[in-house]
Amino acid sequence: MLEIKGISKTYGDRRVLDGVSFAVKSGCLTGFVGANGAGKTTTMRSILGIVEPEQGQVLVDGKPIGPRDRARFGYMPEERGLYAKMRILEQVAYFGELHGLPATKATKNAKSLLTELGLGERLNDKLQDLSLGNQQRVQIAATLVHEPQYLMLDEPFSGLDPVAVDVVLSVLQRFAAAGVPVLFSSHQLDVVERLADDLVIIANGQIRASGARLELQAEHSRGLYDITTDGDAGWMREAAGIEVIDFDRGSATVRATDEHSIQALLREAMNRGQVLSFGPRIEKLSTIYKEVVR
Ligand SMILES: Nc1ncnc2c1ncn2[C@@H]1O[C@H](COP(=O)(O)OP(=O)(O)OP(=O)(O)O)[C@@H](O)[C@H]1O
């Protein structure tokens, strides 16, 4: 497990990280979400020791992180740094060797990762001859080639088509399943909602929410229901203990103050006509995000 405890960083008179604390659990994909400039990259750089925070510490399995731990990290920075004219297999293997792998092992890992990422037919192509999405896959292979035991990726899914997102996801899940803590930042909330086991939401250098995604969604969905009737649902606005959040003719999203109010609403709806569908609503991450960063 990777723990970030009370990290603060100031540039000039701007505090860009303010007591940032969260954990990245082994075996989990943790999505790191925040607006531009919220502090995601600075947090990742602090974990890696590229940025020196004034306060706070990073713990690896309960102990302060050291250079040996950092050598076992895989980090994919926001600024991609590959060689345009180098063949991709050679290039990924080279990154493996830079991390201390023997040449044969580096080539073996590079080949199997690139193949897993769907580039098995392109091993001898130069990077510059690949589409941007495929170049991104190569960058991911270069991040993973030395079999890192901790993973941090800045926007690994940006610019990928839906099939590529799934390919990269399955590779990251394989690492997570082997016990690797995986932290990835993303602006694509729909992608994070689908992929992340845990969530960390940062705004203005402060952590606004963190923990299991499903728990966070359940917490923000308490008392929320979707109901569709065959008539006009306008009467629900007057129902006791009910707040209508959204409304479109026969359909409404409501928040009930208690169990009794929602049961009464359902009975009344059935008295008035047909209830076509009814069920608890799980709040979307994009809505929760807007609520917690406000
Ligand atoms: N070396 C630096 N000197 C001065 N300010 C910096 C430096 N690095 C980052 N900042 C500032 O710190 C804040 C946080 O930046 P950071 O790159 O961590 O945000 P981010 O969440 O990664 O944003 P994005 O989603 O746009 O990548 C920003 O206001 C940025 O301008």
Image: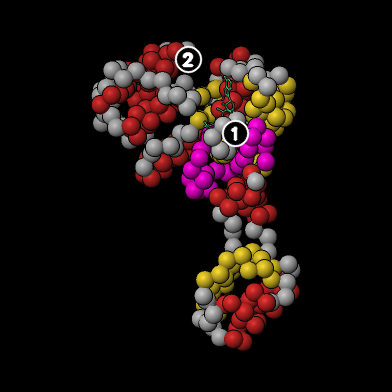
Instruction: Give the residue at x 60% y 30%.
Output: 39
- Disc 2 residue: CB within 8 Å of ligand 1: no
Is 120 in the magenta?
A: no
Is 207 in the magenta?
A: yes
Q: Are marks 1 and 2 in contact (CB under 8 Å)?
A: no
Q: Nearer the viewer, residue 34 or 74?
A: 34
Q: Nearer the viewer, residue 75 or 273?
A: 273
Specify the amino acid type for callout 2. Answer: His
What residue is pinned by disc 1?
38
Instruction: Give the residue at x 47% y 21%.
Output: 146
What residue is pinned by disc 2?
99
Quarter holding the N terminus is top right
- Measure how far apart labels 1 and 2 are at the Cα level: 31 Å
- Disc 1 residue: CB within 8 Å of ligand 1: yes
The quadrant of the rendered image in which ligand 1 is seen is: top right
Q: Nearer the viewer, residue 240 or 278?
A: 240
Residue neighbourhood size for the residue with mark 1, other residues' Cα within 10 Å, grouped as few (<14), some (14–19), many (≥20): some
Please determine whether, in this image, residue 3 is positioned above or below residue 28: above
Whether residue 173 is visible to the viewer of this picture, yes or no, is yes
In the picture, measured across the screen, residue 174 lies left or right of residue 48, that is: left
> Which residue range is magenta in the image?
179-208
